[in-house]
Amino acid sequence: VVLGPIAGWVAGLLPANTTGVAQFLVTLPAVFLLLLPATVPMGATVPALLRGLHGRSADSGRGLALLYAANTAGGVLGTWVTVLWVQPQFGLRTAVMACALCHVLAAALLWRSVPDATWDAPAATAATPGSWPIRLQLMVTGGLGIGLEIAANRALAPVLEGTVYTHAALLGVFLIATAMGSALERARPTDSAAGPLGWLALTTVTAGHALIHVREWQEFLRLHLPVSPLGLFLRESLIALSVLGPPCLCMGSCLVRLLTEARRTGMGTGTALAWNTAGAALAGPLMGVLLLPFLGLRHLLWLLAAGYGTAMAWHRGRAGRTRSMMVGIATVLLGLGMPATLGIPDAAPGTRWVNWIHGATESVGVAQSPDGNRVLSVQGRFTMGGTASTNAAARQMLLPMMWHPAPKQALLLGVGTGISLGATAVDPALKAVGVELLPEVLELQEWFRPHNSPSVDSQCVAGDARRFLRQSRVHYDLIIGDLFHPARDGAGALYTREHFAAMRDHLAPGGIAVQWLPLYQLDTAVLRTIVGAFIAEFPETHAWLLRPNLDTPVLGLAARNGPWAIRESDFTNRVPRGGPMRSRLQAAGLASGESVWGSWLAGPRSLAAFAAGATPSTDDRPSVVFQAPFLDSSPTNRPGTLLLEVIDRFAGEGSEFPVAETGGGWGRRLAAYRASRDAFLHGLAEDDLGNRTGAESSFLRSARLSPDFTLGYSHLLTRAMVRSQSDPEGTRRLLESLREARPEQPVAGQLLDRLESATRRPATQ
């Protein structure tokens, strides 16, 4: 109930560009205090339940093992039921209320229980001198356990999907394996934890070896599990189990033994759990933020194994020196077999990594192909752009810049390679700010020079796009949302009504908000959800195509703070002749007003009809977060299918185009341009299906429809030149049809004359 308002108040304490230590020092105490009323009784639950156990079973340690196993198994059930069912179906607020109701029911069931105070009461009023070593061991093992989870999560990131379901699978496997280790623990109360600690040292290193072969295991599961949401979840769970299963089994056994030893020193179970959890809490910043980026995954796993081995040697003392040495030697030998590149995925075929950074939250790399093109990749799975798509990335900024008559302030949410932000350099009057979540991405900007060189007034900020936008006090002429992979955990929050409302509230008069959508990563249902959320905050939204492309089609939702009124003179008034802006636009395929305004696709009424019945994604019901992860698992998900569906749906809706001039026929020229563009895209689709005749018919129709859209004409010219030797008669017919379609264009006629000359020459000789 209070989380939202207090979070908003805390966020308001910080400037929009606050990062690092300052943000940490403000947000951590606030979150700690906010969650304290719930987390304090949560921590007291297990010790309180232990007091209800019968003395004999508790004293044997078996009662403690079963209770801890049951509690941890409940954590697995809660994780999976909440993420897989309750949150997607009923929303986050309902999920919280359901958890609260479960607590009430549990309290009612236990209300009549009479606690047995003999188990958890310390044997002495003060800790004995022997209790401090066990406290330290509890704390260290808690930190090492979470450190192992952090390392495994990062190493598995290149082969897993990185969605909210991925995190549920990883956490569930971690907990269920630990619970099984606790449930299987049958040691006597006097048994030492040295044995499980030794096995932990060995299995931590073997987890590194399992990571080497995890991709082969993934391919095996991909072939033998069904292509479905359940199959995807099972695949990720089994992959995680192959790596985390053995050490987590040992971890559960080790914790039970350490808790039993703590009891013998006079320490209460609650106190022992507190020390263990304190070590786990410190592991996040220590292992994930400091050691992992500095050491890398291989050396971090070595450090974790060494920590467990040291704890084992401490337990055994001089009497167990031989066993400790044997475990240590085996651990070192196994560790030497781990490659230095552990956690760095294989680069795409034909490329190699030229830089790789293990960051605090993600790993980021730059891959280069033999021709010198470079690609920015997160976790080796998510491509953030590259030099081969420079013009497409530049169009994401250049098109909105052309739609606005004189922008002064621009905000780009998501920087990636920086090529889009660098396009602002052609307008000296425009000051741009780019916000990028991952600092490591900004560190790699130099690998994409000079394609991403921004103006001197532009800047990049490392931070969360939503927080930056909500806290900013600037009103922008352009606010542009980059291509966010909808399936990535966290990215779905950038497609909610609340985020789009923040974009609307920060628009200057006449300003334009744009959200680019990767159609090749969406399906119809998710697209309708996103469109519904956007038009709920921007009713006068228009849809635009980034470029006529079927491999990676991109749709833009654009809304203006004020009415649209497009004139033929807008382009010439905006773009000076002979300047750098004109040259950059020509390089990006935007050499005329027709190429700029011809990217229009649909208007407000058409978009509202398209999204009718869809539930907009919100912060409470982030449907994109839960729907998008399963799109890639569909065998029918072809990149260009959705674009063609959208084009066909909006065909004939050109009356909504916001042209301000009714005379002169410019509106009809734009309509012809769009029809030619759509015919060209259908030709590309036919080409992909291997239908050469259908493709050439569509390209020819595209050439006939508009003199301004020239891609259909140029595609046929290329085909004619390629086939001139193998099929001269077919080439002649193709060029004749092309010359007839566009008689004012001389190239087809020139090629036809050259072809006829070449066919006559052998007969003369």
Image: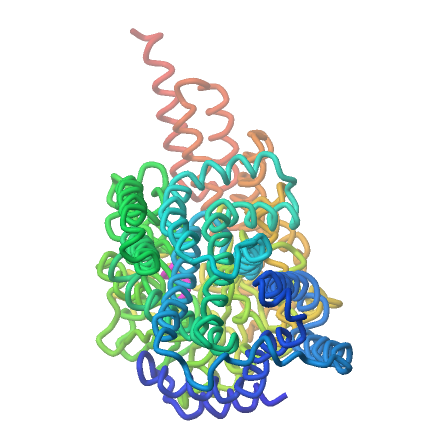
In the image shown, does 362 or 523 lie closer to the viewer?
Answer: 362
Residue 390 image position (x, y, % from top left): 33, 55
Is residue 377 visible from the viewing direction of this image? yes
- Compared to 436, does 523 lie above or below? above
In the drawing, does residue 159 fall left or right of residue 58? left
In the drawing, does residue 372 fall left or right of residue 75? left
In the drawing, does residue 652 fall left or right of residue 689? right
Give the position of the N terminus as an image quadrant: bottom right
In the image shown, does 477 or 2 lie closer to the viewer?
Answer: 2
- Compared to 53, does 315 lie above or below? above
Taking the spot 66% from the left edge, 52% from the top edge, the residue there is 648
Residue 602 image position (x, y, % from top left): 61, 64
Is residue 670 visible from the viewing direction of this image? no
- Compared to 324, does 433 lie above or below? below
In the image shown, does 18 or 323 lie closer to the viewer?
Answer: 323
Q: Does the magenta stretch include residue 394?
A: yes
Q: Is residue 49 magenta?
A: no
